[in-house]
Amino acid sequence: MSEGKEVEIEYLTDENTETSTVEFNIVVTSSDWTLELLASKFQSGDIIIPDYQRKFVWDIRRASTLIESFAIGLPVPQVFFYENNEGQLEVIDGQQRITSIAYFFEGLFGKEDVQGNRKVFKLRGLEQRKDLEEKTFEELDERTKRRIKNATLRGVTVKQLTPEEEQPESVYHIFERLNTGGLPLNAQEIRNAVYRGALLEELERLNKNPDWRKIYGKPDPDPKQRDIELILRLLAFFRNYHDYTPPMKDFLSRSMAKNRHYNSEKNREFSSAFVRAVELINRTLEKPFRPRGLLNAATLEAVMVSLMEQDRSVEFSTDRYDALLLDPNFRVAITSNTSSLDSVQSRKDAADRILFGHE
């Protein structure tokens, strides 16, 4: 498969129709922040841009237009924050605006280049205030400085009152609902935001495994994180099928929250079993987990987890794998309502029985 071609994954369940029964216990507050205060809290780390956020992409002209809007009193869309357990405000929506404001007060734009240099932030491309063109914040007249410092931006802050440990999936849904940007995050990108930590680092490490990349069908990591989500799915089901309850996206969110520190014996066992399984599958099968041409997530989940749960000395054969794909019950479980409780358990039972003789 060529590097430029996107891998299509056959989920065969419409995640948009999966419903959750989450009841939120949150408090929402709205405040008008002065730009001076926003910039100060950003520089001090009280307001943070989570690692999951896409990179800052505005250029100086677009950031300058934002500053001009504040200078002439035009309204600017509100931003959204999530107050985390450390009391920091994570920017859910509004990264470009907040970062631009902080850069202007700092006087430097963007990150350092390879030589360690940064651009000086001089206003450019202004339409109304041509008198401010090519000026830094410090070069503005005192009246304009004061106007910009005291201009306000509405910020909506969401804080969860129920401890995350008791209802981890609700934090996911808060991020999902407030993710209103021009490039909405997908499910795994949201999980990376909410449950970041040692687990995410391990998922990224396993995702680079050469045997896994061959199975996935693309040498480079998927920018949409679908390969990471598949590994998380394997972790969620590893020695844990009995705990599954739909919808799938909440099951995966709970698993990521539960394993975020990735420091248990079971976690270490999973990493070892994953590496062993992908090597064995690559050695045995050609283009695995594609019963209808596309990478089928349900087939991958059932076969991989069943294999990872076996003893190291287990045999894995092409004949048994082919027999599994022909089994009527297995085919139904990987092609119809695949995230239902019955389908999940049925395909795992079939994989255990046909591949490894377990009744």
Image (cartoon, helix red, strand yellow):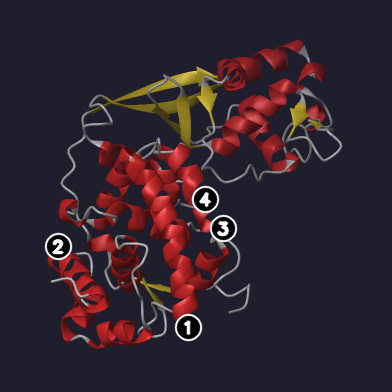
Q: Identify the residue shown where x is 52% and y is 50%.
A: 204
CA–CA distance in space, label 1 to label 4: 24 Å
Q: Nearer the viewer, residue 8 or 262?
A: 262
Residue 286 is marked as 1
Q: Is residue 272 left or right of residue 222?
A: left
Screen quadrant of the C terminus: bottom left
Residues at circles 1 and 4 in contact by the CB criterion of under 8 Å = no
What is the three-letter code of the residue carrying label 4?
Answer: Glu
Left or right of 311 on screen, residue 337: left
Q: Residue at point 31% right, 37% down?
A: 171
Of labels 2 and 1, earlier in sequence is 1
Which of the numbered marks, if any, corresponds to residue 204? 4
* Pair 2/1: label in front: 1
Q: Position of residue 274 (x, y in %)?
A: 42, 59
Residue shown at the point (42%, 20%) measured from the top left: 86
CB atoms of marks 3 and 4 within 8 Å: yes
Query: What secondary structure is found at the residue carrying circle 2?
Result: helix
**Pair 1/4: label in front:** 1
Image x and y of residue 310, in percent: 30, 63
Q: Is 62 on the left-hand or right-hand side of 252?
A: right
**Measured Cα–Cα span from mark 1 to mark 3:** 20 Å
Where residue 55 sits: x, y (%)? 62, 44
Are dots 2 and 3 in contact, CB under 8 Å?
A: no
The kind of residue tagged 3 is Lys
Q: Amino acid at mark 1?
A: Glu
Which residue is the site of mark 2? 341
Upstream in the sequence, badge 4 or badge 2? 4
The residue nearer to you, when weighing 287 against 193, is 287
